[in-house]
Image (cartoon, rainbow, N blue to C red):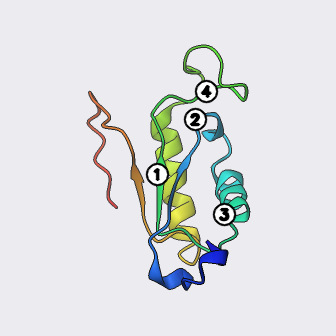
Amino acid sequence: MAASGVPREEYFLVTKLNNNDHGRVQEALEYSLKQLKTSYLDLWLMHWPAPMNQELTGPADPAINWLDTWKKMEEVYKANPDKVKAIGASRRFLGSSYICSH
């Protein structure tokens, strides 16, 4: 992105919270910002409501509730308006009655 010469404010940057990062939301945001070499994201999405182990093997981890992850993403969003402009979900969460406020 930096090599393009396009100012950061001129493009819309989106990335996702990985499935194995549901238990470390704030840390995952910081890692994404560092990897992307940017100070903020325009949109940060929960990749999938299926928290996985660090190796991304096996079924979803039942010990981690994706709604808790979403609530943590809301907290991180509210606490870091300079780092995250909006949050969302990249998949349709069927069967969920939780209504997102952002």
Q: Depth check: 81 or 44 in front? A: 44
Name the residue type under label 2. Answer: Asn
Q: Earlier in the sequence, mark 3 or mark 2?
A: 2
Q: Alpha-carbon distance for marks 2 and 4? A: 5 Å
Q: Alpha-carbon distance for marks 4 and 1? A: 16 Å
Mark 3 vs mark 2, foreground winner is 3
Name the residue type under label 3. Answer: Leu
Q: Depth check: 101 or 59 in front? A: 59
| Residue at image location 56% in from the left, 15% down from the top | 59
Query: Dot 3 corresponds to which residue?
Result: 36
For the residues labelled 4 and 1, say whether their Cβ atoms are less than 8 Å apart.
no
Kind of element beneath mark 2: helix
Crowding around mark 4 (Cα neighbors within 10 Å: few <14, some 14 to 19, many 20+) is many
Query: Dot 1 corresponds to which residue?
Result: 45
Name the residue type under label 4. Answer: Met
Query: Dot 4 corresponds to which residue?
Result: 52
Q: Earlier in the sequence, mark 4 or mark 1?
A: 1
For the residues labelled 2 and 4, say whether their Cβ atoms are less than 8 Å apart.
yes
